[in-house]
Amino acid sequence: MTTDSATNATSPGNDSEGEPEDAPATDQVQESSSEASTGESAAAGTGSAGGFAAGAGAVISAGLGVASLTGTSLGEMLKTRKEIIGQIESGTGGGGGDQIEAFYGAPWDVAALVNGVIGLVAVVLGGVLLAALARRAEAHTWVKAVALGGAVLGVLGLLVAGGMYFDLFASAPELPQQPAPGMGG
């Protein structure tokens, strides 16, 4: 029986002597793996902070792109302000064409300019994000997609604003031609 215990003592599977020899090696592996995971998590933490900012910027770009198409409360406020100024100016005199321009043309142009500026900001923000994320393999795909969507919506907003400003979609209202007095009837 003493031979069996001696053989067991020298065998690697022995619980009493195998643990102390294996324990330091296991501890070293665990320490190095925990250091590696800490380094990876620190790198991931830095990447996730950058990913968070890029994602937020992409969503803001898309929101601004939508706002450039639908209009904003700021644009509506400035349009209404321009209408009021037009009403005040038309009360002091002016022909019918001037009144139409003051009531409809100028406010329409102000709304187009505000929407155009918002569209331009969406294009710039989306473009900058796309350029920054184009070479980064670790960038999330959805961030690139939303940034691209924001840039495309901004371009559409710019086109619509340009069409509004230059009256491409609808011409400005005009007074009908009235017959000259005394021209028979």
Image: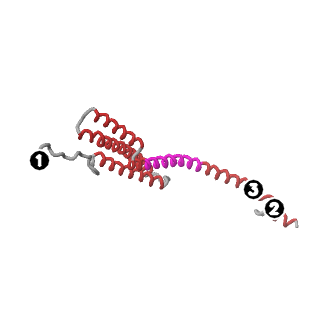
Among the two numbered marks 1 and 2 on one chain, the one whose residue lies closer to the N terminus: 2
- Magenta run includes residue 124: no
Q: Nearer the viewer, mark 1 or mark 3?
A: 1
In space, the residues marked 1 and 2 are separated at their CA atoms by 131 Å
Q: Secondary structure at mark 1?
A: loop
Q: Amino acid at mark 1?
A: Gly
Q: Amino acid at mark 3?
A: Glu
Which residue shows up at 84% across the image and 67% down it?
4
Residue 5: which numbered mark, if any? none
Count residues near mark 2 (Cα–Cα under 10 Å), then give few for <14, some for 14-19, many for 20+. Answer: some
Q: Residue furthest front?
A: 185
In space, the residues marked 1 and 3 are separated at their CA atoms by 121 Å
Q: Secondary structure at mark 3?
A: helix
In space, the residues marked 3 and 2 are separated at their CA atoms by 13 Å
Q: Nearer the viewer, mark 1 or mark 2?
A: 1
Among the two numbered marks 1 and 3 on one chain, the one whose residue lies closer to the N terminus: 3
Residue that label 1 marks: 184
Magenta-drawn stretch, dominant element (helix, strand or loop): helix
Q: Residues at badges 3 and 2 in contact (C-beta under 8 Å)?
A: no
Q: Residue furthest top?
A: 92
Residue that label 2 marks: 9
Residue bounds of the magenta highlight: 39-63
Residue 21: which numbered mark, if any? 3
